[in-house]
Image (cartoon, rainbow, N blue to C red):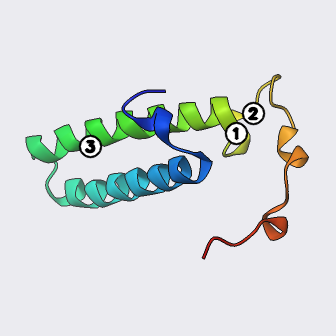
Amino acid sequence: MSNGMNRMNKGELLTFIDEVTFALDDLTLYLDTHPHCEKALGKYETYKAMRNQAVKDYVNMYGPLNRYQVNDSNYFNWVDGPWPWERKCDC
């Protein structure tokens, strides 16, 4: 883990991934109309790297987030934990 993500628990890391993904989506919309904006392009690359690292860290510690991240070492281990409706709500 890097960039301070080593101090995040599972929920915090997942929230961070969601936040960075939102920022990337927002930047993508901006870049659709401003494709030559160097500042936005730089931020996009920064956030993309942050998201890629966070997803990599999450997969290494907690398992795949989607079916494309499944490999021989974590194949079907997602069934070992509680199902979404079996978890406590942190609302």
Residue 28: image location, x then y, percent: 30, 54
Tally of numbered discs: 3
Residue 22: image location, x then y, percent: 39, 59
Q: Which mark is residue 81?
A: none
Label 1: element kind: loop
Instruction: Tell me whether the residue at label 3 lies in contact with that at label 1, contact meaning CB atoms closer than 8 angstroms.
Output: no
User: Residue most toward the front?
Assistant: 7
Label located before the other in sequence (3 or 2): 3
User: Residue most toward the bottom?
Assistant: 91
Quickly name the residue at label 3.
44
Instruction: Tell me whether the residue at label 3 lies in contact with that at label 2, contact meaning CB atoms closer than 8 angstroms.
Output: no
Residue 44 appears in which quarter of the rendering? top left
Residue 76: image location, x then y, percent: 87, 39
Query: Residue shown at 60%/76% (left/top)?
Result: 91
Quickly name the residue at label 1.
64
Instruction: Tell me whether the residue at label 2 lies in contact with that at label 1, contact meaning CB atoms closer than 8 angstroms.
Output: yes
Residue 36 can be seen in this image: no
Q: Which of marks 3 and 1 is in front?
A: 1
User: Which amino acid, mark 1?
Assistant: Pro
Query: Residue shown at 54%/38% (left/top)?
Result: 55
| Left/right of residue 16 with respect to residue 85 in the rendered view | left
Label located before the other in sequence (2 or 1): 1
User: Which amino acid, mark 3?
Assistant: Tyr
Residue 81 can be seen in this image: yes
Label 2: element kind: loop
Q: How far apart are marks 3 and 2 (CA)?
A: 26 Å
Q: How crowded is mark 1: few (under 14 residues within 10 Å), some or many (20 or more)?
A: many
Q: Residue 70 carries which label?
A: 2
Query: Residue shown at 17%/60% (left/top)?
Result: 33
User: Which amino acid, mark 2?
Assistant: Val
Judge by depth and name the residue closer to the eye, 86 or 52. Answer: 86
Q: Distance between the residues labelled 3 and 1?
A: 24 Å
